[in-house]
């Protein structure tokens, strides 16, 4: 049974995570997993993440203009994400929780460094057939081990030089598949020991996540997104280092 303090903390985490997604279009799983993993095992944090992540990413996915075209273009990547996530989900459970925390921290640090130094690359169209499934499997393994969906999917999708709205929709597609695959992986490994209670908690976490997302969208026009992006990435870098050091003690 969660204490009132724990419930308040979870609500605050998802409010903040939703706010970040509302402003920059991504980051809900990254922020939520990073903050929740400070106070609970990664598998429990990932279970709470499922419904807020699925609902917000479905909304992002179906508001774009090129759903069918992106599915045809990226289906091998999505298949790789599904396979890799289900295969790697066992790392989030049991005796592997410490390793998952290290992996989560490392993923946050890597993502923050890539963003802060604006390290990017371009994937030629002729290489997509080879790269997409490999990136998908790698993303799935990271997702299964840490509950974070961004590495290396986000840098790769950015490297395809998609139009702005297509990129946002492609991210929504990737994150939706990752969320569904993570749910399957957690269920398969027995991490959802009390599915009804955990899913109820995840549904309740959706409310502050949606509130935060709407607030973030409302404020997007009133603040510099680039400034917010830098603050966000520095925060992720700090949190990632903290999680790695704590897990290695």
Image (cartoon, grey):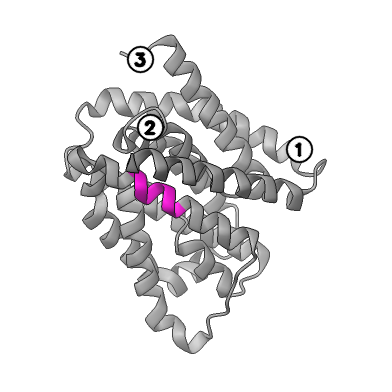
Q: Callout 1: helix, strand or loop?
A: helix
Residue to which mark 3 is pinned: 2
Q: Which residue is depicted at the point 53% across and 53% down?
A: 61
Q: Which residue is depicted at the point 57% across and 76% down?
A: 121
**Who comes first in sequence, dot 2 or dot 1?**
2
Gap between marks 2 and 1, in whole Å?
26 Å
Is residue 185 positioned above or below 79 on the image? Answer: above
**Who comes first in sequence, dot 3 or dot 2?**
3
Gap between marks 3 and 2, in whole Å?
13 Å
Residue to which mark 2 is pinned: 48
89 or 59, nearer to the observer: 89
* Foreground: disc 1 or disc 3: 3
150 or 63, nearer to the observer: 150
Looking at the image, the residue that sits furthest to the top is 4
Can you say which quadrant of the picture contains the N terminus?
top left
Q: Where is residue 50 in the image (x, y as percent from the top left)?
A: 38, 39
Q: How crowded is mark 1: few (under 14 residues within 10 Å), some or many (20 or more)?
A: some
Number of marks in the rendered image:
3
| Magenta residues, dominant SS class | helix
Q: How crowded is mark 2: few (under 14 residues within 10 Å), some or many (20 or more)?
A: many
Say left or right for 102 vs 66: left
Is residue 168 positioned above or below 133 on the image? Answer: above
Can you say which quadrant of the picture contains the C terminus?
top left
Gap between marks 1 and 3, in whole Å?
32 Å
Residue to which mark 1 is pinned: 219
Q: Residues within 10 Å of mark 3 (few under 14, many from 20)?
A: few
Which segment did they paint magenta? Answer: 101-107
Q: Where is residue 132 in the image (x, y as percent from the top left)?
A: 41, 74
Q: Which residue is depicted at the point 60% across and 69% down?
A: 119
Is residue 155 positioned above or below 11 on the image? Answer: below
């Amino acid at each position: 049974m969660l204490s009132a303090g724990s419930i308040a903390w979870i609500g605050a985490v998802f409010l903040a995570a939703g706010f970040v997604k509302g402003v920059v279009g991504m980051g809900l799983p990254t922020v939520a997993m990073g903050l929740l993993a400070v106070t609970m095992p990664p598998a429990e944090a990932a279970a709470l993440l499922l419904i807020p992540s699925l609902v917000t990413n479905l909304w992002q996915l179906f508001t774009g203009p090129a759903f069918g075209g992106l599915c045809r273009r990226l289906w091998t990547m999505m298949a790789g994400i599904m396979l890799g996530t289900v295969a790697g989900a066992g790392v989030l459970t049991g005796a592997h929780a410490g390793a998952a925390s290290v992996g989560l921290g490392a993923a946050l640090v890597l993502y923050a460094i890539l963003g802060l130094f604006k390290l990017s690359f371009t994937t030629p169209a002729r290489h997509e057939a080879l790269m997409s499934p490999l990136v998908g499997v790698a993303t799935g393994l990271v997702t299964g081990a840490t509950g974070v969906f961004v590495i290396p999917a986000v840098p790769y999708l950015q490297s395809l030089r998609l139009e702005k709205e297509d990129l946002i929709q492609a991210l929504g597609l990737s994150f939706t598949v990752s969320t569904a695959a993570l749910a399957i992986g957690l269920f398969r490994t027995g991490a959802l020991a009390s599915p009804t209670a955990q899913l109820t908690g995840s549904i309740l976490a959706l409310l502050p996540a949606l509130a935060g997302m709407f607030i973030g969208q409302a404020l997007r026009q009133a603040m510099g997104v680039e400034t917010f992006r830098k603050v966000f990435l520095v925060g992720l870098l700090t949190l990632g280092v903290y999680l790695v050091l704590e897990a290695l003690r």
